[in-house]
Image: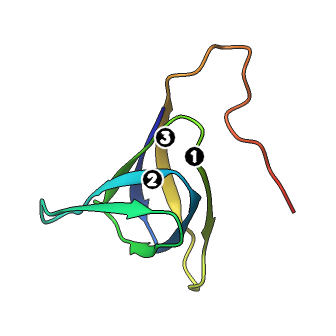
Amino acid sequence: MQIERVMAGVLTYTVVSGEAQVTCADGSELLLEAGKTAELKPGDSLVETAGMVHFGENKGDQPVVLLSSSLFDASQPKAILQN
């Protein structure tokens, strides 16, 4: 499991498989399932479930800053990058 919070910028976030729970800065919640995309703004947070696949893009001109916490074993990589 990973927990992320957008601190700055706008992150375009797409779930490829699995699901992610988004909590918006205004307190509303959104379940992102496979094939769904959302623009995450400062104050928005999300929980990524085990085994899910996603990608994030910065389509804006401002840097995206994320605060991230992972519940992984210390020997596991935080992310596995794919092209």
Q: Position of residue 60 (x, y in %)?
A: 56, 85
Where residue 31 appears, x then y in whole percent? Answer: 31, 59
Q: Nearer the viewer, residue 30 or 2?
A: 30
Residue beneath disc 2: 19
- SS class, disc 3: strand
Give yes or no for contact between labels 3 and 1 (Cβ–Cβ under 8 Å): no
Side of 73 where 77 appears, left or right: right
The quadrant holding residue 78 is top right
Closer to the eye: label 3 or 1: 1
Q: Which mark is residue 68?
A: 3
Q: Percent from the top left, x then y, of residue 68? A: 49, 40
User: Element at badge 2?
Assistant: strand
Is there CB contact under 8 Å for labels 1 and 2? yes
Residue carrying label 1:
52
Looking at the rendered structure, the kind of residue marked 1 is Met
Q: Mark 3 to mark 1: distance in Å?
A: 16 Å
Upstream in sequence: badge 2 or badge 3: 2
Number of callouts: 3
Mark 3 surroundings: few (<14), some (14-19) or many (≥20) residues within 10 A: few
Q: Report the residue at 39% width, 63% height from top.
A: 32
| Residue lying furthest right | 83
CA gap, disc 2 and disc 3: 17 Å
Residue found at x 12% / y 59%:
27
Q: Residue at x 58, y 21 (%)?
A: 72
Q: Is residue 34 left or right of residue 7?
A: right
Using the image, determine if residue 73 lies above or below residue 60: above
Q: Real-space Cα distance between discs 1 and 2?
A: 6 Å
Residue 6, quarter of the rendered image: bottom left
31 vs 62: above or below: above
Residue with the most extreme top position: 74
Above or below for 16 versus 49: below
